[in-house]
Amino acid sequence: MKFTATALFAAATAIVVSADTWKITSLDSGSRSNLCALQISTCQNNCGGPDQAPMAFCNTTTLGWGCGCLKKTPDFDTWNWPVPAADCKGSNEACVANCNVESGDRSACFVNCQDTHKCNTEDAPVSYTETSDVDTAPRYVGPAVSYNGDNLGDLNDGNDRSNLVASTDDSSGSNGSSDASDSSSKKSSDSSDSEDDKDSKSSDAVSVFKTAGLGLAASIAAAMVF
């Protein structure tokens, strides 16, 4: 079979422009299941046993995970949890793969991958996989910041983060916990407003009662004069 120059050029171009785009759900089902099993067992061990970890979960489809203990706050560094660690590793592998297909200084590209993917440390890029419950899908892609709050720039893992702006919550990678906090604050505020309304109504009632009492006393006094 003969290949024309045009066909060969098209094939070569397709290889060059192709780039890896990392997403943790691209892992095969077996790897996702094993990763979730490790995530759950790590949480249970940190909590003190399966019966002490009511919020140890990991969705084998979305890789959304969470850990909550019965009698303590999990004291495991977020960047060392199995799912975030695997997310960092996959992003780094995509970064390196993309260096091999991009034009420019490959050596500098490899160094950038190494500098921006210090996995299993607080300098690792935040993994946006933690969720509030097993049915909530993770964000997956967020601003390129580390757990210590540093801006990492381009992770070169194929994900577009150009329009993402880092916030104070991004260094945790948590998804959904702030909603519960906001809800609690709102309930507290509503309760406070309700109590204020009650106090106001009670004060108004006392005022009306006093006014009515003064009027009645005046009427009695007038009757006694006549």
Image (cartoon, helix red, strand yellow):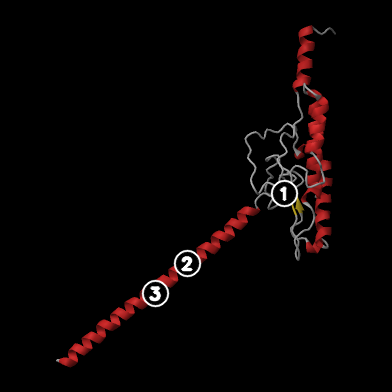
> What residue is disc 1 on?
130
The residue that appears at 76% across and 39% down in the rendered structure is 24
Element type where label 3 sits in the image:
helix
The residue that appears at 69% across and 53% down in the rendered structure is 133
Question: Where is residue 178 shown, x and y percent of the image?
Answer: 63, 53
Q: Which amino acid does the dot numbered 3 rest on?
A: Ser
Q: As rendered, which of 145 and 199 lies closer to the eye?
A: 145
Quarter of the figure that contains the C terminus? bottom left
Which numbered disc, 1 or 3, marks the residue closer to the eye? 3
Mark 1 or mark 3, which has the lower sequence index?
1
Residue contact between numbered discs 2 and 1, judged by CB atoms under 8 Å: no
> What residue is disc 2 on?
194
With 177 as the anchor, is 103 left or right in this view? right
With 74 as the anchor, is 189 left or right in this view? left
> What residue is disc 3 on?
203
Which numbered disc, 2 or 3, marks the residue closer to the eye? 3
